[in-house]
Image (cartoon, rainbow, N blue to C red):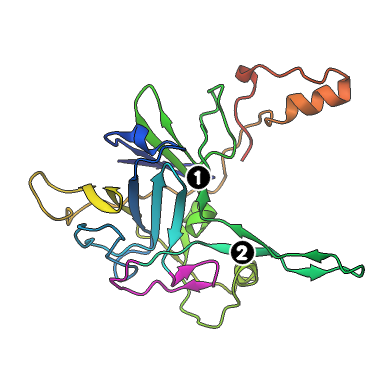
Amino acid sequence: MYADSDEAFLYLAFDVKGADNLLPEKNTGMTLNVGISTLGKGHGTVKLPVDGLPLLPRGVELLLQINGQQSLLLNTPDYSRADSHFWAAPSSDPTFEHVKYVTNREQVALDGTYFPTIVTDQSILKYGVFDRSSPQFNSLGNWYIDKPTGRLLVRLPWGLINVTDPSSNQVIYDTSRQLPPGPAGMRNLALGELGTMKTPGFLFYAATSLSGKLSDYGPRQAGSTTFAGKVSPYTWRGWETATTREAFKQSYPYLKGVYTGTAGTQVPPAQMTGQAH
């Protein structure tokens, strides 16, 4: 497993045997499960929902699940933006939950028209190539399998993993039980009223499973029946000034066509290299 990052994303790469079985639309029952520890010792659960998997040496607050049906980034119930729970107590509970926000509350118009509640699930990860040099580039992609190498590549926006300021390595940590749920609770961050801490670094524990039962896991030493106890966490250097780069957005050729009367023409992929962030 390999980790890297920039100003916008955390990047992960995995060498997974039979990775093609994880592709969308494939119903093989295979899943890549990755527990992610962001708060360090004394936080999170040491148990993932995989039958036969030994306990983790360090608690995790997040669970990345990649499979052919639906790929997700889940949170423990006490480290979730949905309910504004950010203390991540130590536990051995294998429960992980979706992060869902009510973006539109139900309403009834004056003429009696009913508009149902709209809920956004922020845990769902989209399959799509995020390599800007690829003709298949998808600016919304969270994961894909790189055909030349066979590696499974993942990118996660910092906000999705509760990193508030990557330039200073800050993650959410707040023991308050009084925060309002959902976006209202997150607004406390802008007001300086939501607690944060400097992460000691991220640790990752991966396991492949078939229909929920363990196939393989790591990191571990050869012949061992437990996870490796001493693993260096992933850390990154902070910054004072973010690096940016200018580029066309994917919608540029279409908008250009509308305004110039050349609708249907496209900018060659080589000219669509990147996006300022």
Asked if one can make out residue 218 in the rendered structure from this viewpoint, the answer is: no
Q: Residues within 10 Å of mark 2 (few under 14, many from 20)?
A: some
What's the residue at 69%, 28% (across, down)?
248
Circle number at residue 101: 2
Task: Classify the position of the N terminus by image quarter.
Answer: top left
- Residue 72: percent from the left, percent from the top? 46, 51
Element class at badge 2: strand
- Magenta-span inclusion, residue 184: no
- Residue 94: percent from the left, percent from the top? 32, 66
What's the residue at 27%, 65% (across, down)?
46
Give above or below for 198 relative to 17: below
Q: Residues within 10 Å of mark 1 (few under 14, many from 20)?
A: some
Which numbered disc, 2 or 1, marks the residue that appears first in the sequence? 1
Q: Amino acid at mark 1?
A: Phe
Circle number at residue 63: none
Give above or below for 101 relative to 244: below
- Magenta-span inclusion, residue 81: yes
**Do the numbered discs 2 and 1 sit on residues whose CB atoms are within 8 Å?**
no
Task: Classify the position of the C terminus by image quarter.
Answer: top right
Q: Amino acid at mark 2?
A: Tyr
| Magenta segment | 77-94
What's the residue at 46%, 37% (across, down)?
25
**Magenta stretch prevailing secondary structure:** loop
Alpha carbon separation for disc pair 2 and 1? 22 Å
Tell me the residue that label 1 is attached to: 9
Asked if one can make out residue 177 in the rendered structure from this viewpoint, the answer is: yes
Left or right of 26 on screen, residue 205 = left
